[in-house]
Image (cartoon, rainbow, N blue to C red):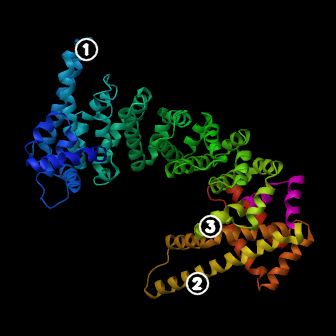
């Protein structure tokens, strides 16, 4: 609210400053309640404070101290405010039913209702009193107003703006008890379904209604952040369908499309139910169609780039579900990602991440075979041999790039059979085994990084023991995550590739691996230790049967290394 009125409010503040408050009432009579509360506080501020700061201070004072009449806000005044709202809401509804074709008869009650909803914003400063909204039936009445016929007066400048403030994540976290009561009541009233219905009838060509859509999405984001478990219910109440429809709408890029991509990525995070629903709604095709724009063109703005990354993240989340990998394959997603890698645009890094998610694990077998068939090896191995300069914005990007490339190659070695596997292994023998040389170069690079991390961790453990602190499982897990972050996972992938190609039956590859290990002072024992640790931690989220079979397969490979 403040940002929207700031420019105009600055000019008004200057006028009020010259008149020392004489114009405040006249401005309020024009119905600009936002400017009124900013101005009323600005007049009270010291002369030396800059006028723009007046606006910020005014908003803060309003949020934390006063309602419009300047009365202190307590439980009694909040009850009075809610009861006034209930009366005005009932009166407006009664007159609308009685005089449906005569707007003039109920227009005054409409304005009165609008005023009391504006005053109720002060309740958002006291989440410990949210229970009053539920006990006095105000939440039910507010949700009823979401289907109000007059979208000009209540077009999210009132009910939705109020709900957005009430559900602000910082406010909710101030009082967990009050927040829980409010969210429970909203969900019981099917708030998401009502919000989606309202967005359906809004015309985003009108700025006020486009703002209403944005604010509605903010309510959903606030509730999802406070209670992630509601994402499944929200998606099933029409939100997923509306988001996909809005994302694929053929209208110019705007803030609402960006926000839709963010909400979609949130819904799909760690949630197989929403991933399955998106697949059933042909969402994989929608994501691929929207991303295909960035195959040969970079995003025009930073905001558009953010939207592109959100859509890539959503696609990666979807590919965690096996059924969606089939849809991705049928929708020619592999071909699109392969083209993005070749085109060398900004989408290349994210396309690599998508390929990694699509090909990993036994569920990625079909994708691995198709990747070889579409000549994907010609694309991936140049990226393995050299990290592109455009991706070297920071050291972490190098690591991320090398991790995804090594993971794709490791997935191919695990999943490919017959002719496709032969084609992959032949790549390692090309040009006097140059790819084996690169493999060993990366191995020693990440081995050194992990050994440095291990040395620091051992020092910390030693200090903790001296202080008498206990090294419990939580601390051990934290240390293991730090080792992974230092490069252990990439090192494990590199060792896995070494072991796989050494067991390929091509003596040239095995000899080259051992030759470089001996020249660089490496050790087969170190590689075996790394792979045993990898096997012990494999299979998180998978069945016990998968975990045991995969561990046995890795141990069998180590026997012959």
Q: Where residue 553 sits: x, y (%)?
A: 78, 63
Q: Which residue is mark 2?
A: 455
Residue at horizontal 13 percent and vertical 42 percent from the top: 68
Q: Secondary structure at mark 2?
A: helix
Q: CA distance from mark 1 to mark 3?
A: 66 Å
- Tag 3 secondary structure: loop
Using the numbered discs, state the Cα–Cα distance from disc 3 to disc 2 in whole angstroms.
27 Å
Per the rendered image, the range of residues in magenta is: 408-428
Q: Is residue 208 left or right of residue 347?
A: left
Helix, strand or loop for disc 1: helix
Report the side of 12 relative to 234 (left or right): left
Of the numbered discs 1 and 3, the one sitting upstream in the chain is 1
| Residue 422 falls inside the magenta stretch | yes
Left or right, 109 with reference to 280: left
Give the camera-side residue of 89 and 532. Answer: 89
Residue drawn where x is 75% and y is 48% of the image: 367
Q: Is residue 72 left or right of residue 505?
A: left
Q: Position of residue 408 (x, y in %)?
A: 73, 58
Looking at the rendered image, the quarter that the N terminus falls into is: top left
Q: Nearer the viewer, mark 1 or mark 3?
A: 3
Q: Main secondary structure of the magenta part?
A: helix
| Label 3 or label 2, whichever comes before in sequence order | 3
| Residue 484 forms part of the magenta stretch | no
Q: Position of residue 387 (x, y in %)?
A: 69, 66
Label 3: how many residues lie within 10 Å, few (<14), some (14-19) or many (20+)? few
Q: Which residue is mark 1?
A: 97
Which quadrant of the view contains residue 422?
Answer: bottom right
Is residue 556 shown above or below 165?
below
Q: Earlier in the sequence, mark 2 or mark 1?
A: 1
**Residue 123 sits in which quadrant?**
top left
Up-down: is 525 above or below 279?
Answer: below
- The tag on residue 392 is 3
């Amino acid at each position: 609210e403040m940002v929207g009125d700031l420019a105009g409010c600055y000019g008004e503040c200057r006028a009020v400053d010259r008149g020392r408050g004489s114009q405040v009432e006249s401005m309020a009579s024009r119905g600009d309640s936002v400017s009124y509360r900013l101005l009323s506080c600005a007049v009270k501020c010291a002369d030396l404070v800059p006028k723009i700061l007046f606006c910020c201070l005014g908003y803060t004072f309003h949020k934390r101290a006063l309602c419009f009449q300047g009365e202190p806000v307590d439980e009694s005044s909040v009850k009075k405010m809610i009861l006034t709202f209930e009366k005005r809401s009932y009166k407006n509804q009664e007159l609308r039913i009685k005089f449906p074709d005569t707007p003039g008869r109920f227009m005054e009650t409409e304005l009165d209702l609008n005023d009391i909803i504006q005053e109720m914003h002060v309740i958002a400063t006291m989440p410990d009193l949210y229970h009053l909204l539920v006990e006095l039936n105000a939440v039910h009445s507010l949700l009823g107003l979401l289907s109000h016929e007059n979208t000009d007066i209540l077009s999210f400048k009132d009910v939705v703006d109020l709900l957005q403030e009430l559900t602000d994540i910082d406010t909710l976290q101030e009082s967990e008890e009050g927040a829980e009561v409010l969210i429970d009541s909203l969900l019981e009233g099917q708030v998401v379904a009502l919000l989606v219905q309202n967005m359906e009838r809004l015309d985003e060509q009108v700025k006020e209604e486009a703002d209403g859509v944005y604010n509605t999405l903010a309510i959903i984001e606030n509730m999802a952040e406070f209670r992630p478990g509601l994402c499944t219910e929200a998606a099933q109440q029409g939100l997923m369908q509306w988001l996909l429809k809005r994302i694929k709408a053929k209208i110019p890029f705007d803030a609402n499309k960006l926000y839709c991509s963010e909400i979609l990525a949130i819904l799909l995070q760690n949630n197989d139910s929403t991933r399955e629903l998106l697949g059933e709604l042909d969402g994989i095709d929608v994501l691929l169609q929207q991303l295909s724009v960035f195959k040969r063109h970079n995003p025009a703005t930073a905001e558009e780039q953010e939207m592109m990354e959100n859509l890539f993240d959503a696609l990666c989340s979807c590919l965690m579900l096996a059924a969606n990998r089939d849809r991705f394959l049928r929708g020619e997603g592999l071909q699109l990602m392969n083209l993005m890698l070749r085109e060398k645009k900004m989408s290349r890094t994210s396309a690599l991440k998508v390929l990694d998610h699509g090909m990993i694990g036994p569920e990625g077998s079909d994708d691995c075979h198709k990747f070889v068939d579409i000549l994907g090896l010609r694309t991936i191995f140049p990226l393995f041999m050299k990290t592109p300069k455009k991706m070297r914005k920071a050291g972490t990007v190098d690591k991320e790039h090398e991790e995804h490339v090594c993971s794709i190659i490791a997935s191919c070695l695990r999943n490919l059979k017959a002719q496709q596997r032969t084609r992959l292994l032949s790549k390692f023998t090309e040009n006097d085994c140059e790819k084996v040389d690169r493999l060993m170069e990366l191995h020693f690079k990440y081995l050194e990084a992990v050994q440095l991390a291990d040395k620091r961790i051992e020092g910390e453990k030693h200090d903790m023991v001296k202080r008498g602190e206990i090294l419990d499982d939580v601390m051990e897990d934290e240390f293991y995550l730090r080792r992974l972050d230092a490069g252990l996972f990439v090192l494990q992938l590199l060792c896995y590739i070494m072991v796989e190609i050494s067991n390929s039956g091509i003596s040239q590859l095995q000899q080259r691996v051992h030759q470089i290990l001996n020249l660089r002072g490496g050790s087969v024992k170190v590689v075996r230790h790394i792979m045993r640790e990898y096997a012990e931690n494999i299979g998180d989220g998978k069945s016990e049967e998968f975990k045991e079979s995969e561990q046995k397969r890795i141990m069998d490979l180590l026997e012959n290394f």
